[in-house]
Amino acid sequence: MSLLPPYASTNSTHCFIRPLLTRRVLIRNPSKMSWFQKSFSLKSQSRGSYLITSEITSNLPEIGDYKVGLLNLFIQHTSCALSLNENWDSDVRLDMTDAMNRIVIEDKKYEGIYRHDAEGSDDMPAHIKSSLIGASITIPITDGQLNLGTWQGIYYMEFRNSKHRRSVVATIQGEKTSSAS
């Protein structure tokens, strides 16, 4: 009696082999599939975590043209990040900033914690934080709206002390509504 699941088998060396399970997606009208890309700047901010969901949606009215799809947001900088997190309690944003500052400390006294300090004591910690959080997020679009969870919002996390202008590239891929051209 085999202990393997019915879809599995073994090869000649008795290694467990699991076939790749695939799921088929039916595209009803491929001509409605569309790509769209746009760049825009975020409001300049100094160090902190900022809820920017409404800024994103106001810069991207094109979201409303899609029945189903994906929005990818990519921030074109190495000392800030984008994230999804709680949008209800503003203390979460303050706590996120505080936590990142505790996790990656700044070498304010230039004691040699980091080799890269030519752009200021906050620069290398900003690069590390950016790598930890990430430069992009992807959000599903359903019936012309971002399909975020009940308490989810889009965060722009700035890791430099002074204000910087940040550019975002937004890419939408999906099926347009029948009324969209």
Image (tube, rainbow, N blue to C red):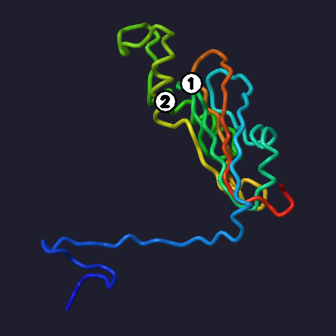
- Residue under the image location 66 percent in, 25 percent down: 166
Q: CA distance from mark 2 to mark 1?
A: 7 Å
- Residue under the image location 38 percent in, 15 percent down: 114
- Residue under the image location 73 percent in, 31 percent down: 40
Name the residue furthest bottom: 1
Name the residue furthest left: 13
Q: Which mark is residue 159?
A: 1
- Whole-percent x, y for residue 139 in the image: 64, 51
**Split into 4 quadrants, where in the image is the C terminus?**
bottom right
Callout 2 touching callout 1 (CB < 8 Å)? yes
Q: Which mark is residue 129?
A: 2
Residue closest to the eye, 20 or 152:
20
158 to 142, vertically: above or below: above
28 to 112, vertically: above or below: below
Q: Amino acid at mark 2?
A: Lys
User: Quadrant location of residue 97?
Assistant: top right
Q: Secondary structure at mark 2?
A: helix
138 to 165, vertically: above or below: below
25 to 132, vertically: above or below: below
User: Quadrant location of residue 67?
Assistant: bottom right
| Number of numbered discs overlaid on the protein picture | 2
